Amino acid sequence: MNKRNLDAKRIVIKIGTSSLLYQDTSKLNLRSIERLAFVLSDLKNQGKEVVLVSSGAIGVGMGRLGLSKRPDTIPAQQAVASVGQGELLGIYEREFQHYGKSVAQMLLTRDVLVYPQSKKNVFNAFQELLKMNVIPIVNENDTVSVDELDHKTKFGDNDQLSAIVANLIDADLLIMLSDIDGFYSGNPLSNPSAELYHTITNIDGSIIQAAGGVGTKFGTGGMVTKLKAAKRILKNHQKMILANGKNPRIIYNILAGDPVGTLFEPFLNQKKLSRKKD
Ligand code: ADP
């Protein structure tokens, strides 16, 4: 399989809850977080610009408060998220500091899409942080976001948030790390013969159909929200790679152009979807 040509300097990395927590115990996967901090710090040393979009606030909050079940009410979810967000940022701060890197917390609401002034402010804040060599760590502002009809400030999920951030800062690449090797022709959990797509250039009906329901206990979106994110990326003529975040060192393979994960890129010369041949 040919190498991909990905010349990416400004990179957004989204990590899902399923890569941050152990499924069985719901506790933090410290090894994964430590490796992520190492790889992203190393990329900074190579001169790349890196933005991390991290899920996990509710899952981490549940672990900290000893809850085995996600709370049902929105106020309780928001309270748990605020506990988890603090702890999560504290862990990132410690891990990145180990490699001499500074991080910044960016908690966003949908206002960045609705109000041009908010969008401009957030864009300027990103620019300044990147200029200062800081790694922005982005999440939805779960504690205050609401989903009311007349006042919708929620993005809904971090997959789409990561695509919005990639659009906003004009990133060269969005790397979406999940608990699966890429996008398959069906949910591999229920369909063992599903095949991994190497490249997708257009999100058509058959692709949407291949995205089954939600995946894991903590993950909220499954593939549906990842496809929505990919759609946004393709529309903006950008690129996204969906890959397995089990070992964040996969980011090195991705940037080296190795054929790992599924690449979503705008239609260029390819006539049709190419499937990975093993
Ligand atoms: P994350 O927490 O990383 O955002 P999710 O658990 O929300 O991840 O979504 C990933 C899950 O989506 C996979 O583990 C898989 O079970 C499920 N899934 C459904 N359809 C597909 C598909 N076509 N290809 C790959 N994974 C799929």
Image: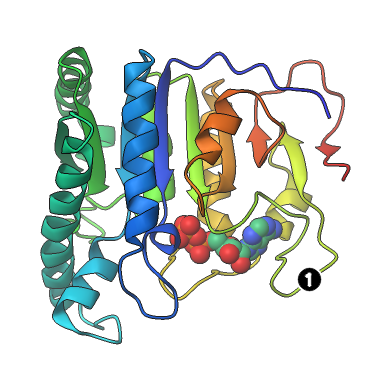
Which x, y percent locates residue 48?
Answer: 38, 17
Is residue 201 or residue 278 the one in the foreground?
278
From the viewer's side, name the closer residue of 144 and 62.
Answer: 62
Image position of 159 (left or right of 53): right
State left or right for residue 273 relative to residue 151: right
Front-lying residue, 80 or 247:
247
Looking at the image, residue 99 lies above or below residue 169:
below
Report x, y in % for residue 103: 17, 34
Give the image location of residue 19, x and y in percent: 44, 58
The 10 Å Cα crowd at callout 1, few under 14, some 14 to 19, many 20 or more, is few
Could you tell me which residue is drawn at 61 percent across and 57 percent down?
A: 180
Q: Residue at x 31, y 66 (%)?
A: 28
Which residue is nearer to you in this view: 20 or 232?
20
Q: Is residue 109 visible?
A: no
Residue where numbered disc 1 is placed = 191
- Percent of width and height locating residue 7: 56, 13
Q: Is residue 34 above or below residue 113?
A: below
- Label 1 CB sits under 8 Å from any ligand 1 atom: no
Is residue 195 shown left or right of residue 100?
A: right
In which of the image's four quarters is ligand 1 placed? bottom right
- Quarter where residue 203 is shown: top right
Residue located 60% across and 18% down the image: 6
Residue at 36% across / 32% down in the picture? 40
Q: How many marks?
A: 1
